[in-house]
Amino acid sequence: MPWFAELGANIQKFLLYRHCRFFPMLFNHPEKCEGDVYLLLVVKSMILQHRRREAIRKTWGQEREVRGKKVRLVFLLGVTIQGEEHPHHQKLLEYEDRLYGDILQWDFEECFYNLTLKEVNFLKWFSIYCPSVPFIFKGDDDIFVHTGNIIEFLESSGGMLDLFVGALLSTSLPIREKNSKYFIPPEIFNGTFYPPYVSGGGFLMAGPLAMKMHIASENMDLFPIDDVFLGMCLKVLHVSPKPHSGIKTWGVQEPGKEKMISRDPCFFQNLLVVHKLTPGELILMWKLVTSDLICTRVRKLGSGLRASTRIN
């Protein structure tokens, strides 16, 4: 078809394999949901990002009890099929999984348009193995998460069965520029606005809702942008995603310095999620925020925020 020939290679490849959605699992850990698990931390990662995974395990992804609630961690991965080093990378991942036992890997290629495959395969996995887990946090592998604040928020939510919370985008336009990473032609989506969705950098959802989303997703065409696809699932289920001011998937910016991301731990102390940190920054920030941190002067974000920090 002429319209197909005019699209970029990535969209063409997506359309050719759009019908393929469930893939064999290479690493599986159903035991992650055994027992009285309250919150499952789910992190999208890639084989070569082992330093990010290690930093998460040492910081907010520690498997422990937080405020008396059991927390467990898994990473979602595909496979890297390009390059002569691929077999070696896969062997290193096998060793990593033997050490930590927290890798869920499927046999599909890692690429931006296949992030939706991580969503649908995880939703299926969760529906099979985790029917009693009440809450999921899902995010990227370069974020800071204040696990204690998340648990506190979930406790105050009243156990909402349709909870879906994050950095909300309510009137997002599809990108028609072919050179954009987020290019979507009208043949795939011809609406003016995407349905409301939250940024995939970090969000919370209720376990029962995740199982309903799995059922809904099975009857929907896959969409190249994963967080938009989840918004489409929510629309089918007549569930509205909600915003949370403590989820900063675009970082925390100081007024008057729009391009500079704050690294003051007092900015992080009362937040749930902050994006984007290197592994070294994450480890340092975690140590500061979980230390005897005293923020002696703080004004509200967006109104000339300044803070002075003292660590005892």
Image (cartoon, grey):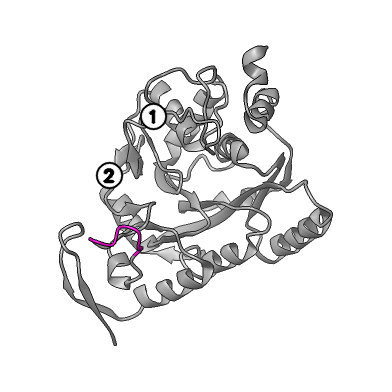
| Residue sitting nearer the eye, 92 or 208 | 92
Around disc 2, counting alpha carbons within 10 Å, would you say few (fewer than 14), some (14 to 19), or many (20 or more)? few
- Which residue in the protein does label 2 denote? 158
Q: Label 1 vs label 2: CA separation? A: 33 Å
Which element is circle 1 on?
loop
Which amino acid type corresponds to the residue marked 1 in the rendered image?
Leu
In-image side of 107 versus 228 (left or right): right
Which of the two residues, 93 or 115, is positioned nearer the viewer here? Answer: 115
Label annotation for residue 303: none
Which residue is at the far top? Answer: 1
Residue for point 16% across, 61% down: 300
Front tag of 1 and 2: 1
Q: Quadrant for residue 161, please give it.
A: top left
Whether residue 149 is visible, yes or no, is yes
257 inside magenta stretch: yes
Locate residue 294: give its quadrant: bottom left
Left or right placement of residue 133 versus residue 295 in this view: right
**Viewer-proximal residue, 14 or 175?**
175
Indicate the secondary structure of the residue bearing disc 2: loop
Residue denoted by label 1 = 173
Where is residue 210? Give x, y as percent. Answer: 47, 36
Give me the residue at 32% from left, 72% from top: 265
Q: Is residue 293 magenta?
A: no
User: Does 145 sit left or right of 7 as displayed?
Assistant: left
Task: Work out which quarter of the rendered image holds the C terminus and state it.
Answer: bottom left
Q: Considering the whole magenta stretch, tell me its main secondary structure.
A: loop
